[in-house]
Image (cartoon, rainbow, N blue to C red):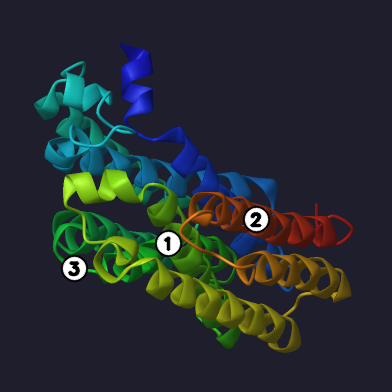
């Protein structure tokens, strides 16, 4: 039973968002005093709020999950978890996560994480995902909130650097998500979800992915020039961004689109992990 309740929080998504939260924290910590308690408070608080959003997503998406091969065995679809209990569980996770951020980091972080929650649950899950090709864009806004919260947990104020960080992760989300939509296109078509590859075709999705990757590369460079990142950041993130662009600009056609999109997706994970990792390594001699 405990495993069922853990599974509906989507641990993989929680982990990915905690990595991006750490990236924002590490970036801000270059210019501010921090301690390990603040770091873990930010990670756990964001993780609990993300978990709550994922449970609500599982509750609301039961009808479309049963139509998709990848999701038809989820616990709420199979009735392994009571829906009313899952809703109370989601509310509990949200309240604890928000309270943790409010008490142990700062009120601004709690407010921003709640804004991201609203975008994910109400705008993305309940409306745009089902009715609009722009659902991915709305989802990218909520997906870019965790690194911003990590940043704000340290600084307690918005800056040009924090805006660029938020924009960077918005841009990263788009090719990452479109790549998933391509190699799972039949699932999305079966469930009637209007993602770009289904509504506009593979060529349009390919063009959008390329444009977003190039925009990501530009903002990643801008973050170095206006922020606190060191040359290690420029070398590592520059190299990974160039590698992502190279993979993205390989030829894509009707015979290799699944392999192409999986490659774009896998490299996107390497990019975001490298981003967080290099910022953390730069920080070690300074504060931790």
**Image check: 26 left or right of 286?**
left
| Callout 2 secondary element | helix
Q: Which mark is residue 209?
A: none
Distance from Cα at disc 1 to Cα at disc 2: 13 Å
Residue 77: x and y in percent read 18, 26
Where is residue 70, by image quadrant?
A: top left
Q: Which mark is residue 178?
A: 1
Disc 2: which residue: 267
Q: Nearer the viewer, residue 66 or 92?
A: 66
Distance from Cα at disc 2 to Cα at disc 3: 27 Å
| Callout 1 secondary element | helix
CB atoms of marks 1 and 2 within 8 Å: no
**Image check: 111 left or right of 153?**
left
At 73% from the left and 74% from the top, the residue drawn is 31
Disc 3: which residue: 132
281 w.r.t. 200: above or below: above
Quadrant into which the N terminus falls: top left
């Amino acid at each position: 039973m405990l495993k069922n309740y853990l599974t509906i929080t989507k641990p993989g998504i929680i982990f990915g968002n905690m990595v991006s939260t750490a990236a924002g924290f590490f970036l801000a910590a270059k210019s501010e005093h921090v301690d390990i308690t603040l770091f873990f408070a930010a990670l756990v608080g964001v993780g609990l709020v993300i978990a709550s959003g994922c449970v609500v997503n599982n509750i609301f998406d039961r009808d479309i999950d049963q139509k998709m091969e990848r999701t038809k065995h989820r616990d709420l679809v199979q009735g392994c978890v009571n829906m009313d209990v899952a809703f109370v569980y989601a509310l509990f996770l949200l309240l604890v996560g928000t309270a943790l951020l409010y008490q142990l980091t700062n009120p601004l972080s709690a407010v921003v994480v709640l804004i991201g929650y609203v975008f994910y649950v109400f705008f993305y899950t309940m409306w745009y995902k089902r009715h609009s090709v722009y659902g991915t864009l709305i989802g990218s806004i909520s997906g870019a909130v965790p690194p911003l919260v990590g940043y704000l947990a340290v600084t307690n104020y918005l800056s040009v650097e924090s805006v660029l960080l938020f924009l960077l992760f918005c841009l990263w989300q788009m090719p990452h998500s479109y790549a998933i939509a391509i190699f799972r296109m039949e699932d999305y078509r079966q469930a009637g979800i209007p993602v770009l590859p289904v509504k506009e075709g593979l060529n349009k999705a390919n063009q959008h992915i390329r444009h977003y990757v190039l925009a990501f590369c530009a903002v990643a460079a801008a973050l170095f020039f206006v922020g606190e990142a060191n040359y290690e950041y420029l070398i590592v993130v520059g190299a990974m961004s160039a590698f992502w662009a190279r993979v993205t600009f390989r030829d894509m056609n009707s015979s290799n689109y699944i392999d192409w999109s999986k490659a774009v997706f896998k490299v996107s994970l390497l990019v975001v992990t490298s981003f967080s990792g290099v910022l953390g390594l730069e920080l070690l001699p300074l504060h931790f």
